[in-house]
Amino acid sequence: MDLRPGLAARVELTVAEADTAAALGSGDVPVLATPRVLALAEAATVAATAAALPAGSTTVGTRVELAHLAATPVGRTVVAEAILSDVDGRRLGFTVSVRDGDAVAARGKVERVMVDREAFVKRAYQ
């Protein structure tokens, strides 16, 4: 296992109608929805550690702190970046940001916990 602070990844999204607050029910405006911003940030956290996890392991989200700072209209491309900032046993802490060009559209922290994929799914469905 080579999980160490500094691992990072970026994920891009060109905002479509399906990504808007109006489409997702988190508001009634045609701009990038906060739930979609969060999903994009989490996708970046998953990508940052995927290659470093032990075989059979995955991570699950356990805590999020996110400030959605700016509206992003349909057609714009945003880039989410996650950086693994701390490792405490199975707990992984990330700093995340979402940028729309040079502007920071969102920033925050995401915590994930490493689990055995098969055991986790089995427990969830019992």
Image (cartoon, rainbow, N blue to C red):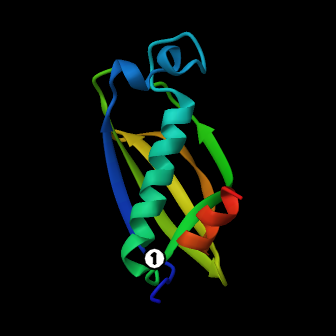
What is the x, y in percent for residue 119?
A: 62, 72
- Residue at figure coordinates x 41%, y 55% from the top left: 81
What is the x, y in percent for residue 120?
A: 63, 67
- Residue at figure coordinates x 56%, y 31% from the top left: 34
Does residue 102 sit above or below 64 in this rendering?
above
Judge the density around disc 1: few (<14), some (14-19), many (≥20) Cα neighbours within 10 Å. few
- Residue at figure coordinates x 40%, y 43% from the top left: 99
What is the x, y in percent for residue 100?
A: 37, 37
Does residue 47 sit above or below 56 in this rendering?
above
Q: Quadrant of the C terminus?
A: bottom right
**In this orientation, does residue 73 appear?**
no
Q: Is residue 86 left or right of residue 80?
A: right
Does residue 21 sit above or below 86 in this rendering?
above
**In this orientation, does residue 107 appear?**
yes
Residue sitting farthest toward the front: 126
- Residue at figure coordinates x 32%, y 39% from the top left: 13
Give residue 113's quadrant in the image.
bottom right
Amino acid at pointer 1:
Gly
Q: Is residue 95 left or right of residue 124?
A: left
User: 109 and 57: which one is in front?
Assistant: 57
Residue bearing mark 1: 6
User: 77 and 119: which one is in front?
Assistant: 119
What is the x, y in percent for residue 75?
A: 28, 23
Residue sitting farthest toward the bottom: 1
